[in-house]
Image: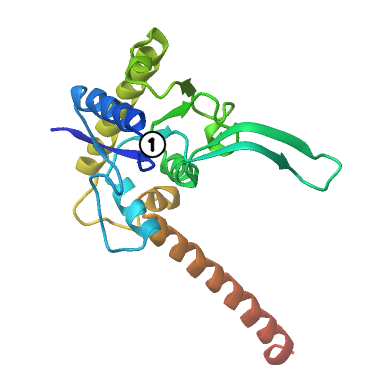
């Protein structure tokens, strides 16, 4: 059975971009992976972030395909400041690449980042984080290089390892959890993003309420 992969990619506006996306989709499918991309083969009436979150939680890895969305022939960064500098021929991908890369990282998924050559180095699409950023030409032939094939194969293997681990955890979890014996970090690992935030807020509310109750008891009751 194919392993679901979240594919973060903007809408293609040129034939070369569409050909590039299809070539990556073919690579994924040939390795037993099923690419799922919002606005391409996945659609919903829900709020975008909510739908992306739910979809990503069903996937076992994420591939970021960042290519030109906006081209700046000439501009100025930090305009009006002493650090102002001129920008020329800057390529900017869709901001959703940044958002979805950060969400995949929080989920701990194996992350493959493919960025068009000449793109502006910023955010999670620049080198120096916990993943390797491949700068390539938006051309199917650029996927045949030794470097790309090596990085891609390594990522595919990590995706399969991550999937095996997730499947093993599912089998090990009892149908009815005994929360008296489960550790706090194990409990949090079972929660979704939304559930985790609600749990944190609930704990914070309890701590705050307990503090003020203690102050009240000390000041007015125990005196």
The image shows residue 167 at horizontal and vertical percentages of 23, 37
Question: Where's the C terminus, which quadrant?
Answer: bottom right
What sort of colour scheme is used for the picture?
A: rainbow
Q: In this view, does 187 lie above or below 110?
A: below
Residue depicted at 36% across the width and 43% down the height: 11
Q: In this view, does 161 lie above or below 200?
A: above
Q: Quadrant of residue 47?
A: bottom left
Residue depicted at 27% across the width and 25% down the height: 23
The image shows residue 124 at horizontal and vertical percentages of 54, 37
Dot 1 alpha-carbon crowd within 10 angstroms: few under 14, some 14 to 19, many 20 or more: many
Q: In which quarter of the image is residue 14?
A: top left
Q: In the displayed image of the protein, which residue is found farthest to the front?
A: 73
Q: Observer-nearest residue: 42 or 104?
A: 42
Q: How many labels does the image show?
A: 1
Question: Where's the N terminus, which quadrant?
Answer: top left
Secondary structure state at the residue bearing disc 1: loop
The image shows residue 64 at horizontal and vertical percentages of 41, 34
Q: Is residue 103 above or below residue 139?
A: below
Residue that label 1 marks:
109
Q: Observer-nearest residue: 119 or 186?
A: 119
Q: Observer-nearest residue: 167 or 123?
A: 123
Q: Is residue 105 above or below residue 156?
A: below
């Amino acid at each position: 059975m194919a392993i679901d992969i979240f594919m973060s990619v903007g809408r293609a506006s040129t034939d070369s971009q569409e050909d590039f996306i299809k070539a990556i989709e073919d690579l994924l499918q040939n390795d037993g992976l099923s690419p799922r991309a919002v606005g391409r083969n996945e659609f919903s009436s829900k709020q975008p972030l909510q739908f992306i979150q739910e979809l990503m939680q069903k996937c076992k890895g994420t591939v970021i395909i960042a290519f030109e969305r906006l081209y700046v022939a000439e501009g100025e960064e930090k305009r009006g400041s002493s650090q102002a500098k001129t920008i020329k021929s800057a390529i900017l991908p869709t901001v959703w690449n940044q958002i979805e890369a950060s969400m995949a990282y929080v989920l701990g998924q194996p992350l493959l980042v493919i960025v068009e050559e000449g793109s502006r180095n910023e955010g999670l699409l620049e080198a120096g984080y916990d993943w390797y950023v491949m700068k390539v030409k938006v051309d199917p032939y650029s996927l045949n290089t030794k470097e790309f094939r090596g990085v891609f194969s390594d990522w595919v293997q990590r995706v399969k390892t991550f999937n095996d681990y997730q499947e093993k955890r599912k089998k090990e979890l009892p149908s009815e959890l005994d929360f008296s014996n489960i550790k706090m970090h194990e409990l949090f690992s079972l929660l979704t993003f939304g559930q985790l935030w609600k749990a944190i807020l609930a704990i914070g509310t309890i701590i705050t309420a307990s503090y003020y109750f203690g102050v009240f008891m000390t000041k007015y009751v125990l005196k």
